[in-house]
Image (cartoon, rainbow, N blue to C red):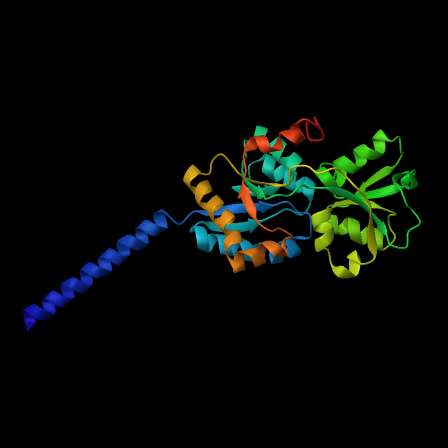
Amino acid sequence: MLRKVSGLFLAAVTIMAGMLDVYAENQDNPKKVYTFGIVPQQSASRLAEQWGPLLEYLSDKSGIELRFKTAPSIPKFEERFALGDYDFSYMNPYHYVVASESPGYQAFAKVADKKIRGIFIVRKDSEISNLEGLSGATLAFPSPAAFAASILPRSELKNRGINFTPKYVNSHDSVYRGVVTGLFPSGGGIVRTFNLVNPDVRDKLKVLWKTPGYTPHAFAAHPRVPDDIVKRLRAAMIEMGDYERGRTLLNVLGMKRLEEAKDGDWDDIRQLNIQELDN
């Protein structure tokens, strides 16, 4: 009987020792959490509401722990990706071109079969019917380097010789609300965020003008992220279109499905030779 008790005691001690070893190992090598930075086209709370469930879904499917991050404004987002703060990031086409040079982010996915288009919006009851009607006005834009919502619309006005004063208001939603409330006669945005804005705002606005289409936002990885991690995440993202839950989460963001991307997909942006963030 004594031998049996002693044997059980030794077994229990061995199990406990093993558990302590595993605990110590986990403390020394905790599971890596990868940050996922989202360009703040909308408020941080709205982005978290839209992107949080999607990142949770991708974490579950890929086995990669993802943590949502953003910034209080687009210029702050630019500062942070320039410093390499994000392991993964969803960034506008021009941001990607800059970030691919330094610190070396590499695109691995994008929205399939889609082009990004910038827009000018006005109130539905506005008498402005063309871009010339914006002459001399103060116009709202998310930030200086917001590609389709700011750079392209401003370039169009300059090319037409239309004088205007830009006012940067930090997000796409702020542009739309500023025009609705009458703070600005018009402002720049993109089709996707316009479709996603609160219906109480969207229903009071109309699109005055659209830009040509360009390669859309990039899903990109910092060069420190291991290749196998990028491949696992990309596979999970592409497979979202095969599942009802995945399609629902994409639909919340105005996306249908995602596809593999390569750096050269953004050569159409490079050819524009934009220099907004050269400094």
Q: Is residue 216 above or below residue 7?
A: above
Q: Is residue 213 above or below residue 272?
A: below
Q: How many marks?
A: 0
Q: Quadrant of residue 96?
A: top right
Q: In the image, residue 156 lies at what x, y percent? A: 81, 34
Q: In the image, residue 270 lies at what x, y percent? A: 65, 28
Q: Is residue 172 left or right of residue 123?
A: left
| Residue 70 seen | yes
Q: Is residue 270 above or below residue 246?
A: above
Q: In the image, residue 62 lies at what x, y percent? A: 44, 50
Q: Nearer the viewer, residue 238 or 279?
A: 238
Q: Is residue 184 left or right of residue 141?
A: right
In this view, the residue farthest toward the bottom is 1
Q: What residue do we see at 43% from left, 47% from top? A: 32
Q: Is residue 160 left or right of residue 45?
A: right
Q: Is residue 115 left or right of residue 176?
A: left
Q: In the image, residue 98 lies at what x, y percent? A: 62, 31
Q: Nearer the viewer, residue 111 or 85?
A: 111
Quarter containing the N terminus = bottom left
| Residue 102 seen | no
Q: Nearer the viewer, residue 182 or 79?
A: 182
Q: What residue do we see at 55% from left, 58% from top? A: 53
Quarter containing the C terminus = top right
Q: Quadrant of residue 177?
A: bottom right
